[in-house]
């Protein structure tokens, strides 16, 4: 196990705990309802109850067994609940006619999504800041499809995109239109706004003059969606926004005077706010698309606390890369066991965004403007349902990005 992964797990454990700490009881109740937790019987232990009442020692032994069994049951059941359902795999050939654009497709949840959606036959455009990383990702998607199906999917492409550079974002639609990916399909079926950074330690300002988390996670995707909206399939498309349960950190709602960290910058708050912005953007996009009579389904989701490299932003990307080859000791591995227990593997974590991008979740009416977790829709808290803030955020974002949505 590499030290970088080990660090990811520890930090993600903190994220998971933070998300749970901020989860209001209604959300947790919904979560419990949506996750199938198998029941474990302790009846084999109870079956011998008449025998064990004969002596104190036996009674103690019996209690130890029952309590131990109950604890083990709790640990296993909770572990299953954290893990969520088995990875969702769309059937082979079910997406042959779809073009799917995935931001941040070179690693983590984006790359895993590209692999499984490509296996189902979709044409994939995965964006990457680095051409080299993008090309490596394309090859790994192709290899995965071949491994899974024994057949090639050659329709996997990469295009450069830096969400922290509005020039790069605004020029993307033209690049896509001119790319070979667009020659066979003249419209986009799914835009998966997946790329993101988390808990950047210090206030960092992009070349466009905005706080890095705000621009990477919200503003860049907002501007990208505006640019790509005219290319969305008029017969039906989905915009899948990868948000997070961390939006609950911002349960007091958006402070329109501090969108850019001008008054105060706190790393986790900035992340929570950006993930709340993803949901408010989803809701306002849905409202406007419906009013304009366009067949767009916008949906947001939480993947779970997943063992990706997302926490690299906390320690700094350079340092994280330099730790890649370090080997942790046995003691380090022991310390990391709880982190494994509280986090999901990438294949499970990517399921919800894959499921939604494969046009699952019931009719479009069931999915429109909703927030999904573990492939089920979840109740949102009032801050995420505040349509006044959603409208304000939309207007401010158009001004900041210097773009106008055609909605
Ligand atoms: N992992 C979790 O536990 C978790 C939980 C809840 C929500 N999420 C959300 O899931 C999404 C994917 O995260 P992940 O866990 O897969 O993390 P990841 O492995 O770190 O992937 C993040 C991706 O975003 C890209 N990216 C970052 N800044 C960018 C920018 N300015 N322009 C373009 N691309 C940029 C990265 O590109 P580079 O490789 O070039 O940096 C990378 O491809 C994020 O939106 C995250 O908030 C994750």
Image (cartoon, helix red, strand yellow):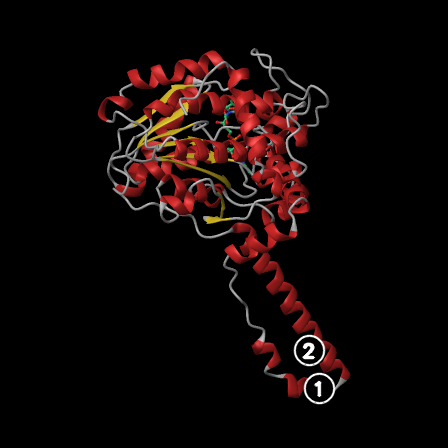
Contact between labelled residues 2 and 1, with CB atoms less than 8 Å apart: yes
Front-most of residues 36 and 136: 36
Q: Earlier in the sequence, mark 1 or mark 2?
A: 1
Is residue 287 visible in this depiction of the protein?
A: yes
> Which residue is depicted at the point 55% across and 48% down?
379
Under 8 Å from ligand 1: the CB of mark 2?
Answer: no
Instruction: Give the total number of marks visible in the rendering.
Output: 2
Residue 293: x and y in percent read 35, 33
State the image quarter where residue 294 is shown. top left
Question: Which residue lies most toward the front here?
Answer: 291
Q: State the quadrant of the N terminus.
A: top right
User: Label 1: how many residues lie within 10 Å, few (<14), some (14-19) or many (20+)?
Assistant: few
Q: Quadrant of residue 47?
A: bottom right
The image position of residue 331, as x and y in percent, is 68, 43
> Residue at position x 29%, y 35% from top?
122
Residue 79 seen in the figure: no
- Residue placed under numbered mark 1 in the picture: 53
**In the image, residue 276 above or below residue 229:** below
Q: x, y (%) of residue 101?
A: 37, 28
Q: Residue at x 48, y 34 (%)?
A: 282
Foreground residue among 169 and 91: 169
Q: Which of the labelled discs sits on residue 62, or is there none?
A: 2
Residue 344 rendering spot, x and y as whole percentages: 53, 45
Q: Quadrant of residue 141?
A: top left
């Amino acid at each position: 196990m590499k030290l970088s992964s080990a660090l990811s797990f520890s930090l993600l454990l903190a994220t998971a705990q933070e998300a749970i700490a901020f989860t209001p009881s209604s959300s947790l109740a919904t979560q419990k309802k949506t996750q199938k937790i198998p029941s474990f019987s302790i009846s084999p232990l109870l079956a011998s109850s008449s025998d064990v009442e004969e002596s104190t020692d036996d009674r103690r032994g019996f209690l130890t067994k029952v309590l131990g069994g109950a604890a083990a049951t709790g640990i296993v059941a909770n572990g299953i609940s954290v893990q969520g359902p088995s990875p969702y795999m769309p059937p082979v050939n079910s997406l042959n006619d779809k073009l799917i654009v995935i931001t941040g497709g070179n690693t983590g949840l984006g790359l895993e999504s590209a692999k499984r959606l490509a296996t189902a036959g979709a044409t994939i455009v995965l964006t990457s800041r680095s051409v080299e990383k993008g090309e490596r990702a394309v090859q790994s998607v192709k290899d995965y499809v071949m491994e899974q199906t024994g057949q090639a999917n050659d329709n996997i492409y990469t295009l450069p995109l830096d969400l922290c550079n509005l020039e790069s974002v605004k020029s993307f639609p033209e690049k896509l239109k001119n790319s070979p990916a667009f020659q066979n399909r003249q419209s986009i079926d799914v835009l998966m706004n997946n790329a993101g950074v988390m808990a950047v330690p210090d206030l960092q300002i992009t070349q466009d003059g905005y706080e890095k988390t705000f621009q990477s996670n919200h503003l860049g995707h907002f501007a990208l969606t505006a640019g790509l909206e005219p290319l969305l399939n008029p017969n039906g498309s989905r915009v899948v926004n990868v948000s997070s349960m961390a939006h609950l950190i911002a349960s007091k709602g958006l402070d329109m005077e501090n969108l850019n960290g001008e008054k105060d910058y706190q790393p986790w708050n900035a992340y929570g706010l950006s993930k709340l912005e993803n949901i408010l953007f989803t809701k306002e996009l849905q409202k406007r698309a419906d009013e304009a009579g366009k067949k767009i389904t916008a949906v947001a989701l939480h993947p779970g606390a997943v063992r990706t490299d997302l926490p690299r932003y906390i320690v700094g990307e350079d340092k994280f890369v330099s730790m890649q080859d370090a080997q942790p000791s046995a003691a380090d591995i022991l310390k990391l066991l709880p982190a494994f227990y509280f986090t999901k593997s990438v294949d499970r974590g990517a399921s919800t965004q894959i499921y939604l991008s494969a046009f699952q979740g019931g009719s479009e009416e069931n999915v429109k403007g909703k927030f999904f977790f573990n492939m089920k829709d979840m109740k949102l808290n009032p801050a995420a349902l505040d349509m006044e803030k959603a409208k304000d955020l939309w207007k401010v974002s158009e001004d900041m990005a210097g773009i106008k949505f055609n909605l």
